[in-house]
Amino acid sequence: MSIVHVCVQLLFGATAGKETVSRARAQSHSSFSDSFNVSQERIVITNSSGEKLIGVLHEAGSKDIVVLCHGFRSSKESRTIMGLTDALTSEKISVFQFDFSGNGESEGTFQYGNYYKEVDDLHAVIQHFKEHKRDTRAIAGHSKGGDVVIIYASMYQDVSRVINISGRFDLKRGIADRLGSDYMERINQHGFIDVAQKTGQFMYRVTKESLMDRLRIDMQSACMSIGPNCRVLTVHGSDDDVVPSEDALEFHKYIGNHEVHIIEGADHRYSSHRLELANIVLKFVTSG
């Protein structure tokens, strides 16, 4: 069963198996409680490549956990991830946030694409907790992390709730914004593209292999491969200038058990709308 919100329903019309998608405006809570103790434990998990993934487990009282996944060139300490951690633990839901390989404190080399490698990292995390008798209540990812959790759900059936926050549906889009419109010509000529800041300082290298890793991903196929018993939530900001909010509607077309929330005025990082985001995620994680 899918949920989309009132303004969006006009775009879809009445479709079988789809409920309505509304746009979130109001905040259901003004603040989150911090009246109890949350312990933190640094955990090291080895992925299938032998690299150490560094994460922090926030013990808030629940046996099961929510795993949070960061976005492109980000880390477990991103404000979006930390805001969700605070909101979930305030409701006594334990949270694990970690750095993908090649990012943050984790071992490995940063790669531009690496979607399936990050899915493998996430699988290593979920298996680690399963071995320690801890189930994963939900997985949530922001931006690129949103794509990772969607792909994960298309490959594995061990998580019943998936939260895609500002993920990109069409992975062919957005590349020219970072690499320039002639990126294919340049990468075919040189085999790589070095990305620099406006000051000229080197940031990262995009190899042809890592670019093709991204271009080969078919998100439509991944969405259609998610089982009907897996509930998926997509949240997007109407004013996202990195990934257009229309991508949220594309996810809705191809995921059967799906709910969409468009937060009016929110940007890609939910800079002024973190409370609305947290409330939507909390409701989804705790419902049913």
Image (tube, rainbow, N blue to C red):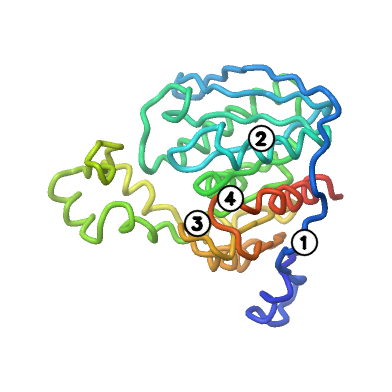
Query: Disc 2 marks which residue?
Result: 67
At x 48%, y 23%, the residue is 105
Q: Nearer the viewer, mark 1 or mark 2?
A: 1
Q: Is residue 217 above or below residue 206?
A: below
Question: SS class of the residue under badge 3?
Answer: loop
Amino acid type indicated by mark 1: Ala
Amino acid type indicated by mark 2: Val
Q: Find the distance from the CA under tag 3 to the CA under tag 1.
A: 25 Å
| Sooner in the amino-acid sequence: mark 3 or mark 1 | 1
Residue 40: image location, x then y, percent: 70, 20
Q: Residues within 10 Å of mark 3 (few under 14, many from 20)?
A: many
Q: Nearer the viewer, residue 187 or 1?
A: 187
| Residue furthest to the left | 189
Question: SS class of the residue under badge 4?
Answer: loop
Amino acid type indicated by mark 3: Arg
Query: Disc 1 marks which residue?
Result: 26
Query: Disc 3 marks which residue?
Result: 168
Query: Disc 4 marks which residue?
Result: 271
Asked whether the beta carbons under mark 4 and mark 2 sit within 8 Å of each other, the answer is no
At x 68%, y 24%, the residue is 57
Q: Nearer the viewer, residue 178 or 86?
A: 86
Q: Nearer the viewer, mark 4 or mark 2?
A: 4
